[in-house]
């Protein structure tokens, strides 16, 4: 029987992992800082879980309350900058996306990460009215994960072409692209009927075809351009000079010989 | 006879030089290769350096032009993404014949280190390439050498494009 490979995560993996290796975790600390305590207090009921990771307050909230939470953070707690919004694909493990908002308070020099979980297929409320920077970030989130943001002013792909299929940062998306991706430029420029003429992509740039006499020449042999050498390569007197080759089998070093 | 006067004696007294149409055209074409000002990624920085005063492309007659209509050489310098492939091909189509293409750097040659879904795995999938130039990034000297090799190749060409065979234009 063929070995079963899970299809929900096709990302490249290390070919060797220690069975007993446990990934180290950043230690989580209780909220002790005065300012962070005030932030958690201001948000009240909406915070499901709060802890500090490397001087960075992490707040878990419900995905439906993201707008209200960010509004409070901005207006009452002084987090005027939203430096990053993105998502993490946990679909294979938990069937959910993790969406995070990285906030910065310049007056207090503090950072807060707001984290929420979103089921696949659901949309999240856009925070563009609060932070202009969310515009591109949410478009990128849509482009890379397919997570839609409700009430976004212009929700369209930002990095990939508009007619692209698939969302590349999903774990189900292969790194080297699916069928659509591998023929994209050919289909677009020349049309599908040119696939046969152009041929599939060469995904191994180091590949050397020893019988290809157009682009490679054989070391130590002289072969005419485009000659067929698949059978009966002829030996020619051109060989590499032996001066620079060390014969390790004899045991004596070249230098000694020269003396 | 004054030195600045034409020395008529050297041409048998005639102010003419005899040549063939092939030679004349190739002389013109190879010594005024005008590349398109077109950079795609980090390799383009090296291309700009080649055009600048230190490496000075102008002395090969290579002057960057800002329009594909005025250029006859396309230097694909950098990573060609799949999104951009269409536009690169359109620029190539807009260049008048005869035209040549130099693929500069590993990314343009094979996709290089970007073995991913979004990078064209070698620009020869979309345009015909004359010279492949290895390196990441190739130094300006390498690009100069490539242009000189291309000149050499052009000088082998026949003015009648139909006569040109891949085999005859081989450089090495
Ligand atoms: S070959 Fe290297 S220098 Fe050139 S575009 Fe690719 S990564 Fe950049």
Image (cartoon, coloured by chain):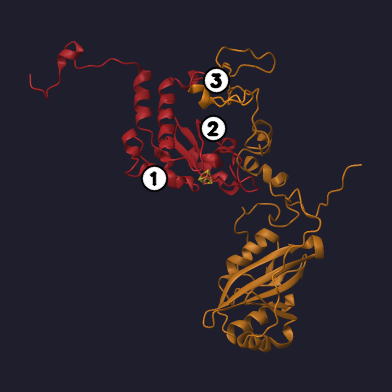
Chain colours: A orange, B red
The local crowd at label 3, few if under 14, some if 14 to 19, many if 20 or more residues have their Cα within 10 Å, is few
- Are the residues at dot 3 and dot 1 in contact (C-beta closer than 8 Å)? no
Looking at mark 3, is its residue's CB closer than 8 Å to ligand 1?
no
The local crowd at label 1, few if under 14, some if 14 to 19, many if 20 or more residues have their Cα within 10 Å, is some
Q: Which residue does the numbered mark 1 point to in the structure image?
A: B49
Relative image position of residue A193 (x, y in whole percent): 68, 35
Q: Nearer the viewer, mark 3 or mark 2?
A: 3
A193 lies above or below A95:
above
- SS at circle 2: loop
Q: Chain of mark 1?
A: B
B143 lies above or below B44:
above
Residue A48 in sight from this viewpoint: yes
Q: Which residue does the numbered mark 3 point to in the structure image?
A: A240
B56 vs A207, nearest the viewer: A207
Instruction: Choose the circle earlier in sequence order: 1 or 2.
Output: 1
- Are the residues at dot 3 and dot 2 in contact (C-beta closer than 8 Å)? no
Relative image position of residue B170 (x, y in whole percent): 50, 22
Q: Chain of mark 2?
A: B
- Residue B99 occupies quadrant: top left
- Say the numbered circle drawn on residue A2: none
Relative image position of residue A181 (x, y in whole percent): 68, 46
B115 lies above or below A48:
above
Relative image position of residue B133 (x, y in whole percent): 50, 35
Q: Which residue does the numbered mark 2 point to in the structure image?
A: B128
A36 vs B87, nearest the viewer: A36
Q: Nearer the viewer, mark 1 or mark 2?
A: 1
Q: In this image, B20 relative to B101: left or right?
A: left
What quarter of the picture does the N terminus of chain B occupy?
Answer: top left
Q: Residue at x 58, y 80 (%)?
A: A79
B99 vs A42, nearest the viewer: A42
Mark 3 and mark 2: Cα distance apart in space: 35 Å
């Amino acid at each position: 029987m063929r070995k079963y490979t899970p299809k929900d995560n096709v990302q490249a993996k290390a070919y060797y992992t220690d069975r007993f290796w446990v990934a180290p975790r950043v230690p989580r600390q209780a909220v002790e800082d005065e300012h962070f305590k005030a932030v958690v207090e201001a948000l009240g009921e909406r915070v499901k879980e709060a802890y500090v990771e490397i001087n960075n307050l992490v707040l878990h909230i419900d995905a439906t309350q993201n707008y209200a939470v960010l509004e409070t953070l901005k207006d009452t707690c002084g987090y005027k900058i939203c430096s990053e919004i993105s998502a993490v694909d946990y679909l294979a493990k938990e069937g959910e996306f993790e969406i995070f908002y990285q906030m910065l308070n310049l007056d207090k020099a503090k950072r807060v990460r707001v984290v929420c979980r979103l089921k696949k297929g659901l949309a999240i409320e856009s925070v563009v009215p609060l932070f202009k920077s969310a515009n591109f970030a949410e478009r990128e989130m849509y482009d890379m994960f397919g997570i839609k943001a409700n009430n976004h002013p212009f929700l369209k792909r930002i990095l990939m072409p508009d007619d692209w299929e698939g969302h590349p940062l999903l774990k189900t998306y292969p790194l080297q692209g699916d069928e659509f991706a591998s023929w994209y430029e050919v289909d677009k420029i020349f049309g599908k009927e040119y696939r046969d003429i152009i041929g599939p992509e060469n995904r191994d740039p180091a590949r050397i075809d020893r019988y290809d006499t157009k682009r490679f020449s054989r070391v130590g042999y002289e072969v005419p351009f485009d000659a067929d050498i698949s059978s009966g390569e002829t030996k020619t007197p051109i060989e590499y000079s032996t001066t620079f080759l060390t014969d390790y089998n004899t045991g004596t070093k070249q230098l000694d010989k020269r003396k | 006879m004054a030195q600045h006067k034409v020395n008529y004696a050297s041409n048998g007294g005639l102010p003419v030089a005899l040549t063939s149409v092939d030679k004349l055209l190739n002389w013109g074409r190879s010594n005024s290769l005008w590349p398109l000002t077109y950079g795609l990624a980090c390799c383009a920085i090296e291309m700009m350096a080649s055009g600048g005063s230190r490496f000075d492309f102008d002395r090969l007659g290579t002057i960057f032009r800002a329009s594909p209509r005025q250029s006859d050489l396309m230097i694909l310098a950098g990573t060609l993404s799949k999104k951009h492939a269409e536009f690169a091909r359109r620029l190539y189509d807009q260049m008048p014949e005869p035209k040549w293409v130099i693929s500069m750097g590993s990314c343009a040659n094979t996709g290089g280190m970007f073995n991913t879904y979004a990078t064209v795995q070698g620009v020869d999938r979309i345009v015909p390439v004359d010279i492949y130039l290895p390196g990441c990034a190739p130094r300006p000297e390498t690009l100069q050498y490539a242009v000189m090799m291309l000149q050499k190749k052009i000088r082998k060409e026949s003015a009648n494009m139909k006569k040109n065979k891949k085999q005859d234009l081989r450089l090495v």
